[in-house]
Image: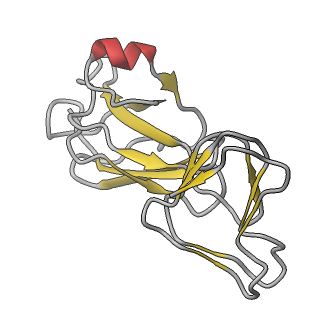
Amino acid sequence: AINTLSAVSGTVAGTVILAWTAPGDDGNTGTATIYEVRHADSAIVDEVTWNTAFPVTGNIPNPPRAAGEPESMTVSGLKPGVMYYFAVRALDEVSNRGAVSANSPGAVAHISCGQVITEDTILGTDLACPPDAEYAIVIGASNITLDLGGHTLSGHTPSKGVFAINQEGITIR
């Protein structure tokens, strides 16, 4: 099983970057044939949670690298500001599946300056907005929470920051 999986917020809205050490096709030797990657809203820890998780498509490393080499990929198409958990497994040349990765790290999909949020959102990194960004974040619905997660929002004028008009029940923490 892959036991080095890590996940961090990406650099583009709706992305998370995954990294791990390549396993072999027979334990720690050789080269796997293909990877399967999944995401969920809670940790993927066994076959049951793997089977209910959503398959990731796109930039999955193919072909995999030799055992012990670093692998990475960017998962895109995620909702910005939402926490996702990930798992990876390798398959060999006859489609024998390795175990679900030994860890299931979580990361918040990157949010961009000017993003309109309409549901509870977590900030996964500091957000520094350029001069042409009207606001850092726009709240577009009532009764939602913006969790800064210990991060900061910054811009170039005092009017930049969080914008919400005609919205009720907004919590920023």
Residue 98 vs 27, above or below: the answer is above
Number of marks in the image? 0
Q: Name the residue rendered at 68%, 62% in the picture.
A: 112
**Residue 61 placement (x, y as % from top left):** 47, 44
State which quadrant residue 118 falls in: top right
**Residue 82 placement (x, y as % from top left):** 55, 43
Residue 68 vs 136, above or below: the answer is above
In the foreground, 133 or 165: 165
Q: Name the residue rendered at 24%, 38% in the picture.
A: 103
Q: Is residue 95 visible?
A: no
**Horizontal side of residue 48 vs 10, given as left or right:** left
Residue 103 vs 146, above or below: the answer is above
**Residue 20 placement (x, y as % from top left):** 31, 49
**Horizontal side of residue 92 vs 163, given as left or right:** left
In the foreground, 65 or 155: 155
In the foreground, 171 or 131: 171
